[in-house]
Amino acid sequence: MAHIPDGVLSLPVIAAGGAGAAIGLALGLRALDEREIPKTAILAAVFFVASLVAVPVGPSSVHVLLGGLMGLVLGVRAFAAVFIGLVLQAVLFGFGGLSTLGVDTLNMALPGVVLASLARPLLLGASPARAGVVAAVVAALAVFGTAAGVSAALALSSSDYVPALKIILLTYLPLAAVEAVITGFVVSFLARVKPEILPVLQPPEIRP
Amino acid sequence: MSEGLACSLAPPSRAGLDRLDGRVRVLAAAAAVATILALGSPVVLTLALVLGLGLALLSGLSGRDVAARLVHMEGFLLVLLVVLPLTAPGPTIALGPVALSQPGLDHAILVLLRVNLCALAILTLLAGLEPVHLGHALARLKVPAKLVHLFLFSARYVAVIGEEAGRLHEALRVRAFRPRTSLHTLRTLAYFVGQLLVRAFERAERVDEAMRCRAFAGRFALIADARLTRLDALFAGGLAIGLAGLLLLDRLA
């Protein structure tokens, strides 16, 4: 849904998206201790598998993006998880764009990463119910952030695309609602069952 | 992956293409996409589409695989293609009661051709490439080692997590769960994702401990004696001539 295929965007937008995603990936990889590689990779695999599940919405169905949840669980490493998911999608199913890999990574990862870090003060030591509500808001806003990114990429590519954007933006509303509810329940579940997965719930470690 | 979960099946790996070096396939796909984006003439793009379809079928993809991929279009692309001719400024042509904008129509046709061609190039050249081979190819193309290792691990664990998801899905079905548009469905799916995360996290801790016991410090030896063969050179040369020819035709057109 947030994937922009090759052939739609203009070259400057592709280049800017690539540069932005490269910065995000570099930050994510720098934050990643080499010994954390297996854990991060396994979580990235979960997000990939979860995004294949079709959630019914009326007569149609949506696939969740889980950008907000990835930001909450992985932090800045979400850039790497999203990028890997996109590459896997290309080799396993032949879907997705190659030139738009950067733009797509940025659109899906950046809102979640930023919003999760902004929500951190609200989540520190929060009860499971409260964490769920905050996470739901983060997830909904992350979807809107992704929608804004997709719109910006299209609008900057060609002014001819602008009229279509209003319709496209409407299609993100049900997704935002679905993601908010799912992420809210996932986070309150994790806060009760396995809070270690959610580093945002815990005070930052003091490293020697 | 379990039925009911996977939204589409992977195209089969193809013997002919699998004899090529992974690096050649990655670079070939990138070169093909870059060339397609540089083409501006609808006639040349149509010619490229015909050639591309021929090559895709020649590579061992079935007509059904290709059709399934090309029909699966992103929703917003469909909206874009319908709205462009109706709203773009410029001279219009009357088609019954609706006035279609000529530049908008041209733009929509160009986008449609480019999108399909790029999808075809990725499907033909990249899809079906073993993730492990892709990981090795990326390492040889100087992609950062951490990213390559993450990719290799993820690719390995997607299958494992997929099986785990299949077991959870079965447990849901045994309890007569049917996805509907309801809060109950959303909550159930949320617990599904949550449980998947918990199990994966616990698995990751076991894997992590096992790897540390075996002195893993963040990198594997990527052992592959992949050398570029004459077949790779032939393929790369042929593709380069083809793409250059298309670019030349496009400049002349």
Image (tube, rainbow, N blue to C red):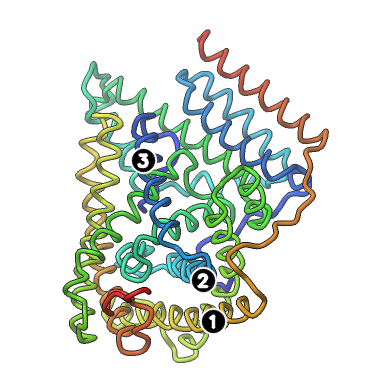
Instruction: Report how far apart the C-alphas of labels 1 and 2 lie in the structure.
Output: 8 Å
Give the residue type at disc 2: Ile
Secondary structure, mark 2, is helix
| Discs 1 and 2 carry the same chain letter | no
Outermost residue to the right: B230
Q: Which mark is residue A42?
A: 2
Residue at the spot 30% in from the left edge and 31% down from the top edge: A157
Q: Nearer the viewer, residue A137 or B219?
A: B219
Seen from this angle, which residue lies furthest bottom? Answer: B175
Which chain does the numbered disc 2 sit on? A
Amino acid type of the residue tagged 1 in the rendering: Arg
Q: Mark 3 or mark 2: which comes first in sequence?
A: 3
Q: Residue A78 in the image: state x and y as whole percent.
A: 39, 61
- Does A54 appear above or below B37? below
Q: Which mark is residue B10?
A: none
- Return the residue at label 3: A17
Distance from label 1 to label 3 (Cα)? 35 Å
**Could you say which is closer to the camera, residue A6 or residue A35?**
A35
